Image (tube, rainbow, N blue to C red):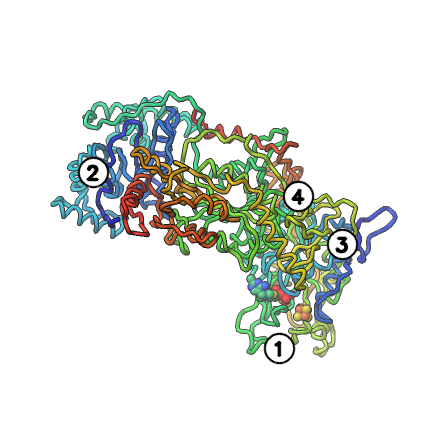
Amino acid sequence: MTTATATANRKLTAKDFQVPFPNDWCPGCGDFGIINAVQQAFARLELEAHKVAVVGGIGCSGKAPYYFPVYGVHTLHGRLLPFAHGIKLANPEMTIVGVGGDGDGLGIGAGHFVNAGRRNLDMTYIFFNNEVYGLTKGQAAPTLAMGLQPKSLPAPNIQGQLNPLMMAMSVGFTWIGRGYSYNVKKVVDLIVAAIEHPGLSFIDILQPCPTYNNLHTKDWYAGKDLDSGQPRIYWLDDTDYDPVIPEGADDAAVLGKMNEFLTKAHEWGDEIPAGVFLDNRATSTFADRIETRIENYRAQPPNKREIADESGRPTADLSEIFDEVRMT
Amino acid sequence: MADRRYEPQSETVTINHDELAWRVGGPQGSGVDTAAGIFQRACALGGLNVFGRREYYSNIMGRHSYFDVRVAHHPVHSHCDEVQLLTTFEDESLARHAISVVEGGALFYAAKDVEKEVQGITYLDLRAKDDLIAYLEERGLPTTLGGVLEDARQRGVQTYEADFDKLVESLADQLDIVSALAARTTNTLAVAMSLALVEYPRKYVYDALAKIWPGRQKIIDMNVAAVDLAYQFVRDTYDTSKFEHRLTPSQSKEPRILLNGNQAVAMGKIAAGMTFQSYYPISPATDESTYLEAHETFPSTNGARGSVLVVQTEDEISAVCMAAGAALTGARSATATSGPGFALMVEGLGWAGINEVPLVVTLYQRGGPSTGLPTRSEQGDLFLALNAGHSEFPRIVLASSDLEEAFYDAAAAFNYAERYQTVVIHILDKSISSKTMSVPPFDLERIRIERGEIASPNGGHEGPYPRFKPTESGISPRPLLGMPGGMHWLTGGEHTQYGRVTEDPVVREQQMEKRMRKLETAAREIPVDEKLRVYGDPAAEFTILSWGSNKGAIVEAIELLAEEGCAARLIQVRIMSPFPGPELEELLAPAKPLIGVEANFSGQLAQVLRQHTGIACDKLVVKYNGRPMAARRLYETFKTIMDGTDETKIVLRNPNE
Ligand SMILES: Cc1ncc(C[n+]2csc(CCOP(=O)(O)OP(=O)(O)O)c2C)c(N)n1
Ligand code: SF4
Ligand SMILES: [Mg+2]
């Protein structure tokens, strides 16, 4: 394993973003396709490994950071977004990719999910949607529909289902896509576009869990149970759906796009849309907003500011601050 | 000590001309803080030493709040339970505090309140009403505020009636403004009347107004007119000869700043080069973060503009995780909270512990458990700070006792965090956060920034960086996220030196031992003067063991004892982890008796001492009503201990605060 850097005579490949360690997901798990796609996306984007952090939650999905030779941060259950925010805010040069489960993101971490939307910080969040809690042996995730009973559930699910796409849109994620983990090629395209988007991106990845989700399997997604025998998933780029909210769009334009989005995000069953649902270029990023207050934020971010001279003396000059409270 | 209910708390306090204890009370939102701000600045500008204590309810408007300001020619470190001068504008303050004015003292009251029944005071707690009514009935006095005033007069207190409405009217006439506008000067009028009564030069009051409203000349002019009116009114209306107290400015020209504990901590963090702070609002921690946000950029000696990025998060879980994330990149980073928020941070602290993240958490204790007494003080979270988290990881716990320590410790916390690459909990309390004091300007020359062992991994090795390589000190060089060649993993799971999760028993032992070794290294390296400090007579056997904000009152109590020839010493523990057990064993050997003084129910420090050394305190003096200790009450308690009381746990109570 070496440090991946593109040079003039050698392009990076997915291999540059692989590690020589065994992987302990169940055979056939949809998670493999996702990390495979991330590795290809990093290579295509020619990222420098040391400028990338992959930040995971807890769950089968949360282990994904171990499979990249970048800064890999395996955090706490539900907390990948706050950790990722801290890293990105303090070192804005880094490319941040969050990887976490549906329970992690919309169960225990839902508060962070909602509030991350308000900030539109530049990072990509890959959401492993298997409708179950894999690592704790198959309980219902918040993405599981009411009435369904995957094999670990002693009785059908009596709690309602969250739609991650609608959640992401309503709280303010500015780039929203959906992929399918067994279609790696499409997932690579989505990840590349999501990382290139200069704000908060969300990719809902339909990720079969062969061990616990016996309802929405690879065969189910392939439509084998349907009369048509056609795959359930269809791609938005094969339709005339346009996900873009252009820079400077007015309220009416935004509202119109949201309505189209809702219609698409609501589709499920025999035909499931995937692809890019939203590409909102009209909303400012968190870094832009910080710069209105801390002018040199990008030039002197928290991790770079020189805080001491050679002899360790503070560089902060508190005389103005003391003057405010100076009495005699 | 007997549980004295609505009763004067002490007969021993007499008028002392070197100092003045003043109290102002009023409903929240009515400008009590502004009044106290004017008073404190006027005194500080006249070279006096100032100590202010703020008491308030968890409420925005209407509930009772009050401010104690003690000013003196000598340094003052605590408040007084009894005051010489009380300013009230309305019924509740008069009902609550008249009893706390000493013989020979004075109070101002509003003319319109005299007939009011105690029973009818809206927010006065039922317990306080019952006690006050019983007290008045016992003395055959009417159960009205008139009765309260009569009792005060019988106890030798001067009562000065003030018709604030009338004063406002005449100010409105004089300045040709509407009364609603003139009424905004009511606080200024009240403060000026108090200062006029003690014949304090009014130029300092003018200067105080200019400090409070810099550049807002119209407001200043209106308030200056109010000051003049108040001084004139006091001279024309009152017989001031019966109130003998006078306050003279000091000749001292020593430089002084006037600030509170939240500000001192914020300044310490800025000085230390903190560049990132996350927080979720909670009393009494919030003011630190909002102060930082208001001062997010500042000049630097290197010519660049310095800054702190302050982020308000969705909850404390996010706050601690975000701060830890920022710290991984090399930014000096912290979060600030109080008990309920700290409780939510616990899992994040463990993550920072196992990942050896230099993370500073500022913990302002308030009354607990649960929501407890959100705006009152307690030292109830020592166990929490020491033990928060499942299993074990090394942590530094640093306890400050006053504003100067708050500043320097806030800065030192980052050195400890980076040197030992672990969690530092800087523990303070509500008393410190909201107390105001005039102190010498902090000296940045005393601060040296030490970043600890940072790796420079560029080249020289293949594969991932061995971030958690075991070392003798337990400290391993730390690559910062974003450094070329420094790539490794971080995980809340037990891990190999590369940060990859493992459950191997041998690696587990190595990593556990490596982490915990840092605590031994810290115990060895941190100078004893940082760990604990001794006040009073170092040779005295009579020994008080305490921590945090009680220090000021204890030191004054020891001074009172010394005036009577009784020797006593205070040992203040500052570093709670690694606990200075060996140092204390030696220091405490001659202690007789050993008295633990703490603002909690069970004497948490005393228990920690026993856990580490086997030494038990002979007596425990505790206070847990949410209010700070006063020097005189401590002094009286220490006297009863010297006189051989057989009580082993003495609870300090004051129903009138
Ligand atoms: C605070 C906390 N509570 C509970 C757990 C136990 N736990 C581990 S993984 C998990 C669920 C993971 O489900 P999901 O996020 O959907 O990830 P998946 O395994 O399906 O990829 C839970 C509840 C934990 N690690 N931490
Ligand atoms: S339990 Fe499901 S999600 Fe987890 S590794 Fe196995 S197949 Fe994958
Ligand atoms: Mg899941």
- Most extreme residue toward the right is A9
Callout 3 touching callout 2 (CB < 8 Å): no
Q: Nearer the viewer, mark 3 or mark 4?
A: 4
Q: Which mark is residue B453?
A: 4
Residues flagged by tags 2 and 4 on a common chain: yes
Rendered view: A44 above or below A206? above
Q: CA distance from mark 1 to mark 3?
A: 36 Å
How crowded is the residue under tag 4: few (<14 C-alpha within 10 Å), some, or many (20+)? some
Q: Nearer the viewer, residue B412 or A251?
A: B412
Q: Which mark is residue B112?
A: 2
Q: Nearer the viewer, residue B443 or B225?
A: B443
Circle 1 sits in a helix, a strand or a loop, which is it?
Answer: loop
Q: Could you tell me which chain the residue with mark 2 belongs to?
A: B
Residue at image position (69%, 74%) is A220
To which residue does mark 1 refer? A151
Residue B478 appears left or right of B47: right
Rendered view: B204 above or below A102? above
How crowded is the residue under tag 2: few (<14 C-alpha within 10 Å), some, or many (20+)? some
Residues flagged by tags 1 and 3 on a common chain: yes
Amino acid at circle 2 = Lys
> How far across and down, in percent of the image, does residue B347 sit?
55, 57
To which residue does mark 3 refer? A42
Q: Quadrant of the C terminus of chain B?
A: top left
Q: Earlier in the sequence, mark 1 or mark 3?
A: 3
Q: Quadrant of ligand 3?
A: bottom right
Instruction: Name the image quarter holding residue B154.
Output: top left
Callout 2 touching callout 4 (CB < 8 Å): no
Instruction: Name the image quarter holding residue A20.
Output: bottom right
